Image: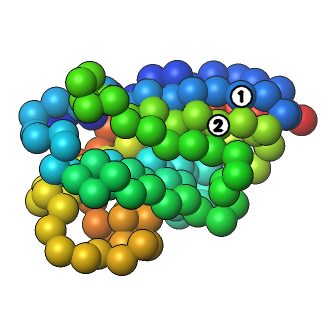
Amino acid sequence: VQLVESGGALVQTGGSLRLSCATSGFTFGDYAIGWFRQAPGQAREGVSYINNKEDKTNYADSVKGRFTISSDKAKNTVYLEMNNLQPEDTAVYYCAVPKNPVTGDNGSYFFLFPLAYDHWGQGTQVTVSS
């Protein structure tokens, strides 16, 4: 299993970025893929996920209305479109996938928790200047 993030950069407050997570090594359409972020000295937090099997998404309250997650099943790639970026969005952003495909009803928030995931990318830095 491999996940490779890209797209991080330094932007000004109010700017936009699109992060990409290119994946391989598993059946993309059967899994949930999550985006997380970690700022210095803080715990890793869930930002958003997409359940490719059921075409469901969810977002942390802090990014709702500003971030959009999407999935290209032909390219096995997940995107995170981030608009109206704020200094508090500064962090290393990671994508992740669980070791098992989606089965059953996991509720709306399960895949926003880091413990739901087993494989992680190396991360990409997003810095928002004020």
Q: Amino acid at mark 2?
A: Met
Report helix, strand or loop for mark 1.
Answer: loop
Q: Residue drawn 49% across and 43% down?
A: 69
Q: Residue 105's quadrant in the figure?
A: bottom left
Q: Is residue 43 above or below residue 119?
A: below
Residue 110 as seen in the image, left or right of residue 26: right
Q: Name the one closer to the observer, 110 or 2.
A: 110
Using the numbered discs, state the Cα–Cα distance from disc 1 to disc 2 in whole angstroms. 5 Å
Left or right position of 42 against 36: right
User: In the rendered structure, are the residues bearing label 1 and label 2 in contact, judged by CB atoms less than 8 Å apart?
Assistant: yes
Looking at the image, residue 97 lies above or below residue 70? below
Disc 2 designates what residue?
82
Residue 124 appears in the picture as rendered: no
In the rendered image, the residue lying farthest to the front is: 54
Q: Residue at x 18, y 40 (%)?
A: 28
Q: Residue at x 10, y 34 (%)?
A: 25
Could you tell me residue 22's position as x and y percent?
31, 27
How packed mark 1 is, by other alpha carbons closer than 10 Å (few <14, some 14-19, many 20 or more), is some
Q: Residue furthest right?
A: 130
Q: Which residue is mark 1?
A: 16
| Residue at the image position 36 percent from the left and 77 percent from the top | 107
**Mark linked to residue 105:** none
Q: Secondary structure at mark 2?
A: strand
Q: Position of residue 74 (x, y in %)?
A: 24, 24
Nearer to me, 53 or 27: 53
Colour treatment of the image? rainbow
